[in-house]
Structure formats: structure tokens, C-alpha cells
Image (tube, rainbow, N blue to C red):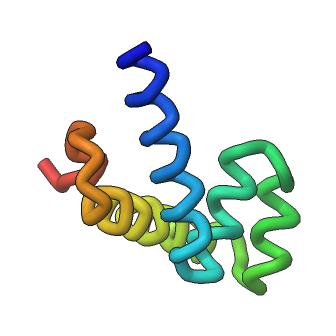
Amino acid sequence: MTKYIEAKAIVDGVNQTYSKGSKELRVVLDNIFGNITTITAMEKLHFEKARYYQIKKRALNEFADVFEVQNLHCPDLHSYIK
């Protein structure tokens, strides 16, 4: 039962992060979740391939920021330059 509650908290956190995020974040997540293709995501954001992948990295770090603020005791999701 505890694992169910923890999993539900994470799913709720992802949903809240999606709704609070920028347009870029929502489009990138729609692509990651399989709701739209990468081509469709690029068209929605009016970006070429190279710019889309730059925005995707920024959007995923935005996701990590917003998700982290919700204090769900999950590991750090940020990507760091090594």
C-alpha cells in the first residue's frame, strides 16, 4: 500500500509539473509521452531540428526544477555537464 501511495504521489507530481510548465515543456513532454511525434513537436514550437533539441534539454531541466519544488523525495533529475 505504501508503494502505491508513493507511486501516486509521483504521478500526481508529474501531472502538476506538466500543467505548471511552459509551452515548450508541455510540447516536449507530449513528445516524450508519445502523444505527438518529434516532427509535430518541432512544428508546434516553430523550431528547426537543432534548436528543438536545445529547447528540449532546457525544458527537461525545467521539468526537474518544477518537480523538485514539489518535494516528493525523488532523486535529482537535473542533468549536469561533466
18, 47: nearer the viewer = 18
Residue 28 image-quadrant placement: bottom right
In the rendering, at what x and y percent does residue 79 appear? Answer: 27, 51
Report the residue at 82% width, 79% height from top.
44
Please report the residue visible at 12 percent of the width from the left and 48 percent of the height from the top.
82
Query: On the image, which quarter does residue 70 sit in?
Result: bottom left
Q: Would you say 32 lies left or right of 62 here?
A: right
- Left or right: 81 as drawn, with respect to 42: left
The residue under the point 84% across, 61% down is 39
- Report the label total: 0
Q: Outermost residue, front direction?
A: 1
Of all residues, the one furthest to the bottom in this rendering is: 46
- Residue 25 x %, y %: 57, 70
Q: Is residue 45 above or below residue 25?
A: below
Image coords of residue 8 (percent x, y): 51, 35
Q: Could you tell me which quadrant the N terminus lies in?
A: top left
Residue 17 in the image: state x and y as whole percent. 49, 64
Q: Along the line of sight, which residue is nearer the eye, 71 or 21? A: 71
The residue drawn where x is 78% and y is 56% is 38
Between 10 and 65, the residue placed more toward the observer is: 10
47 over 15 or under it: above or below: below
